[in-house]
Image (cartoon, rainbow, N blue to C red):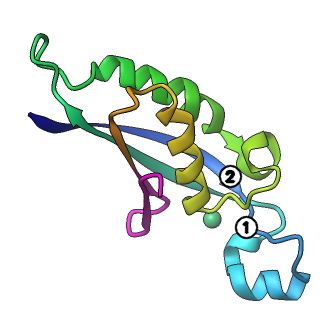
Amino acid sequence: MIASASRVEHFNAAHRLHNPKWSDEKNAAFFGLCNNKNYHGHNYKLIVKVTGKVDPESGYLIDLKVLKDIIRKEVTDRFDHKNLSVDVPDFDDLNPTAENIAYMAWHRIKKHLNPQFELHITLYETERNFVEYDGR
Ligand code: NI
């Protein structure tokens, strides 16, 4: 029996979208308000979905308390109330777009899971804008 189990977490963080290889003009034109040099914040919503075989003995796919602790240790404790562009080494050489935040969350969480489980990350940057990443 294959099932999915999900956990929702939130974090608040600041960032600036900027490509140092581009001119200031090109950055401003491309990233718009998100290129603001003094940063700006988002209230992120992170949905972590794990898919795999349910253990017939326990009836669990994964203990959601364990999943919660992994997400908090690997993602929310690192990102919450931080300036992703300045405070978080994950983004020293990576633009902190929603896509790249989802990518980092995937890699940070995946290493703690049963390797047979699939992991799917959904990250809302605003109520209307979200990205998804599943390791591809
Ligand atoms: Ni932004």
Residue 42 lies in the magenta-colored region: no
| Disc marking residue 14 | 2
Vertical arrangement, residue 32 with respect to residue 6, above or below:
below
> How far, Cα to Cα, is label 1 from label 2?
10 Å
Residue 130 lies in the magenta-colored region: yes
State whether label 1 is within 8 Å of ligand 1. Answer: yes
Q: Nearer the viewer, mark 1 or mark 2?
A: 1
SS for callout 1: loop
Q: At 49% across and 60% down in the image, what residue appears?
A: 125
Q: At 84% across and 67% down in the image, what residue appears?
A: 37
Image quarter where ligand 1 lies: bottom right
Residue contact at pointers 1 and 2, CB within 8 angstroms: no
Q: At 47% across and 24% down in the image, what residue appears?
A: 70
Query: Which residue, given by chain and number where applicable, does mark 1 sit on?
Result: 17
Q: Quadrant of residue 129?
A: bottom left
* In the displayed structure image, the side of residue 65 where residue 101 appears, left or right: right
Q: At 87% across and 80% down in the image, what residue appears?
A: 22
SS for callout 2: strand
Q: Quadrant of residue 29?
A: bottom right
Q: Which residues are magenta?
A: 121-136
